[in-house]
Image (cartoon, grey):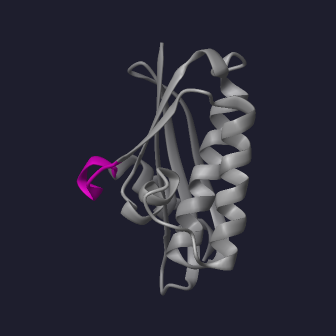
């Protein structure tokens, strides 16, 4: 079984009102979504928060997630490259979020991959993030 996770975070104004969205698939079936208003944040903070929320939700939905292959798809090239350890995390707040993601991965996700995708391939997670921003404003 393969778990696919699409995440997106955004901020209107950068920083500005921010939202996180994610959609989780078990094979080709949607098994969970996330749409959360984050208050005033930057785009990058929102992207990381979307990832944290999505991994937490995936872990809740799949009690045996450690037995599954998990593929995370994001349109943030920066976050993907940081998660793949191709870029260093320099910002203090992002370092905290990065450490939280690494902790979640170490606890529950022995087989996880990160892939950068174009925005057009991430419309569902983007819509959930925008819905969250609309609700929060």
Give the magenta range.
116-122
Q: Where is residue 57 in the image (x, y as percent from the top left)?
A: 67, 37
Q: Does the magenta stretch include residue 119?
A: yes
In front: 31, or 44?
A: 44
Position of 27 relative to 118 (above/below): above
Identify which residue is drawn at 26% across, 55% down.
118
Residue 89: x and y in percent read 57, 69
Residue 64's place in the image compared with 135, above or below, is: above
In the depicted structure, whether residue 67 falls above or below residue 51? above
Residue drawn where x is 48% and y is 80% of the image:
12
Q: Where is residue 34 in the image (x, y as percent from the top left)?
A: 59, 46
Which of the 4 quarters of the picture holds residue 15?
A: bottom right
**Image quadrant assignment for residue 36:** bottom right
Left or right: where does residue 45 sit relative to residue 116? right
Q: Name which quarter of the figure residue 110 lies in.
A: top right
Measured as percent of width and height from the top left, residue 127 is found at: 42, 55
Assess whether residue 117 is covered by the magenta stretch: yes
In this rendering, the count of numbered labels is: 0
Q: Residue at x 71, y 42 (%)?
A: 104
Residue nearest the observer in this picture, 21 or 58: 58
Q: In which quarter of the image is the C terminus?
A: bottom right
Q: Nearer the viewer, residue 69 or 11?
A: 69
């Amino acid at each position: 079984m393969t778990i696919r996770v699409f995440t997106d975070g955004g901020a209107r104004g950068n920083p500005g009102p921010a939202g996180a969205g994610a959609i989780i698939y078990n094979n080709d079936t949607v098994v969970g979504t996330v749409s959360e208003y984050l208050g005033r944040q930057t785009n990058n903070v929102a992207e990381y928060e979307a990832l944290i929320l999505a991994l937490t939700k995936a872990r809740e939905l799949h009690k045996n997630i450690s037995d599954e292959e998990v593929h995370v798809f994001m349109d943030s090239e920066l976050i993907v490259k940081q998660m793949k350890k191709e870029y260093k995390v320099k910002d203090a707040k992002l370092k905290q979020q990065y450490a939280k993601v690494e902790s979640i991965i170490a606890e529950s996700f022995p087989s996880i991959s990160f892939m950068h995708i174009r925005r057009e391939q991430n419309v569902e997670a983007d819509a959930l993030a925008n819905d969250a921003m609309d609700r929060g404003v």
